[in-house]
Image (cartoon, coloured by chain):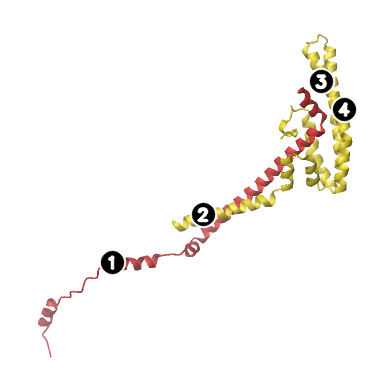
Chain colours: A red, B yellow
Amino acid sequence: MKHSPDKLTEALHRWKVAPPADPNFRPEVWQRIRERTRISWPSYLRAHSAAWSLVAALALGAAAYTGHVAAESRARADREALVVTYLVDLDPRVQALLRTGAP
Amino acid sequence: MRYLLGTLAAILLAAAATGLICFRLNSEPALHAAAEKRDAMQWLRDDFHLSPEQFTAVRELHAAYAGTCSEHCRMIQSASQVRAALAATRSTDPAAVAAAERRVQELRAVCESAIATHVRQVAALMTPADGQRYLSLVLPKIADFDHTAVPDLRLNHQP
């Protein structure tokens, strides 16, 4: 069976496809896009590991140093106060000063 | 953005915990307790690692020194009152004023020397390292006290 090229062209011109409309087509496409781009926290951290490692090292180092300095500062202040307390008891000049108010 | 904020919060939390741990590890609770109670003897015992025998010996030295201290205190008070009386009357005798001032200064010098001797005796009861540390804390203050006004009265064992 042979068709002439003109008839085939004519038949193709007449052919029309009318697929049923899918109302979920667009939401489903977006859903698939979102699933592809969704990333977990560990994946996020792995992706930014260098920057976050630096931030963590700096923050922990600064916190450790601050804690150390604060403890030393408090010990120094405590010791200073105790030396004064000790000498107030021990020093007659200070006791005379406290009683008379005269240097 | 959610992960960024979450990560930042986790790091800040870890930093706060680290700071607190370092503070605890480096703090001296016995020293702080003594300071809060204003207990100088507890401070001596804990901060200078005194054994019970050393601590007893230090207490005995302090008790023995207390009499000397009271006597010096009385003499300084008396000399200061004489000086103050002369100043109040605006004495026309400069020699008397100078003598009163000299007497106060002499007594203060004697007193400073007595305290320094006493603290050296206390230091001798400690280990050499602790004794040295004790003297380095106390001796400069003894010299300072002569030039300062009344120290903070809250330190005079007043709660």
Quadrant of res B77:
top right
Q: Which residue is mark 3?
A: B80
In this picture, residue B22 sits left or right of residue B51: left
Per the rendering, the mark at residue B128 is none
Marks 4 and 3 sit apart, C-alpha to C-alpha, by 14 Å
Q: Earlier in the sequence, mark 4 or mark 3?
A: 4
Q: Is residue B97 above or below residue B106?
A: above
How dense is the environment of label 2, judged by Cα within 10 Å: few (below 14), some, or many (20 and up)? few
In the image, what residue type sits under mark 3?
Answer: Ser
Q: Which residue is mark 4?
A: B71
In the image, what residue type sits under mark 1?
Answer: Arg
Choose mark 1 or mark 4, whichever is in front. Answer: 4
Callout 1–callout 3 Cβ contact below 8 Å: no
Q: Earlier in the sequence, mark 2 or mark 3?
A: 2
Q: Which residue is mark 1?
A: A26
Q: Residue furthest top?
A: B92
Q: Is residue B125 visible?
A: no
In the image, what residue type sits under mark 2?
Answer: Ala
Callout 1–callout 4 Cβ contact below 8 Å: no
Compare residues A52 and B72 and report the one nearer the observer. B72
Q: Is residue B12 above or below residue B70?
A: below
Q: Secondary structure at mark 2?
A: helix
How dense is the environment of label 4, judged by Cα within 10 Å: few (below 14), some, or many (20 and up)? few
In this picture, residue B60 sits left or right of residue A47: right
Q: Which residue is mark 2?
A: B9
Q: Are marks 2 and 1 on the same chain?
A: no
> Which quadrant of the rendered structure holds the C terminus of chain B?
top right
Marks 2 and 1 sit apart, C-alpha to C-alpha, by 38 Å
